[in-house]
Image (spheres, rainbow, N blue to C red):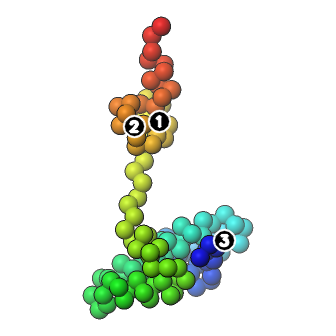
Amino acid sequence: MSVARIYDLYAQKIADITHIPYPYIVALRDQGILDQKAARDKLIFHDYWKLVKTKQFTEKQIIEKLSGVYNVNQRKIQYVIKQKPKRMCYCRNCGTQLSQTIFIRNDGLCDRCIAHQINL
């Protein structure tokens, strides 16, 4: 599915999950500001864990149902469930956002702060 669409029922579920009022969700969706794929992924993640906690269904049954409801393949459902959130790293001097690779390589400093430390 290349285009994610958030319909009114799903907008209500997003409002319930995020505690953001329903009219705001609909307004963001209508203006094209809402990241609909991220919203769909949030719904999939929430529904999956809600069904797992009931202990009435197997993981395969839940994934099969969610793939039908959200019109995505089962691999996408598994990816959404298993993905880890990205860890945010910031420079210790100036506070700019860094990738984890640069943070580890430069011992917590950005390239600009490292450049300021060079004495010529």
Q: Residues within 10 Å of mark 3 (few under 14, many from 20)?
A: some
Residue at position x 45%, y 79% in the image:
74
- Mark 1 highlights which residue? 95
At label 2, counting other C-alpha atoms closer than 10 Å, the crowd grade (few under 14, some 14-19, many 20 or more) is some
Amino acid type of the residue that numbered disc 3 sits on in the rendered structure: Arg
Say which element carries label 1.
loop
Return the residue nearer the eye: 40 or 13: 40
Residue at (45% x, 15% y) in the render: 118
Q: Label 1 vs label 3: CA separation?
A: 32 Å
Query: Mark 3 and mark 2 in contact (Cβ < 8 Å)?
Result: no
* Tag in front: 2 or 3: 2
Give the spatial CA distance, label 1 vs label 2: 12 Å
Compare marks 2 and 3 and give the one earlier in the sequence. Answer: 3
> Looking at this view, is 69 or 25 the one in front?
69
Mark 2 is on which residue type? Phe
Residue found at the far top of this picture: 120
Q: Give the amino acid at mark 1.
A: Gly
Mark 2 — residue? 103
Report which residue position mark 3 lands on: 29
Is any atom of residue 13 visible in this view?
Answer: no
Marking on residue 34: none
Please state, as top left, top right, bottom left or bottom right, where the N terminus lies in the image.
bottom right
Please give the name of the residue rendered at 30% of the width and 87% of the height, measured from the top-left corner. 58
Picture residue at 66% right of the left edge, 63% below the top: 33
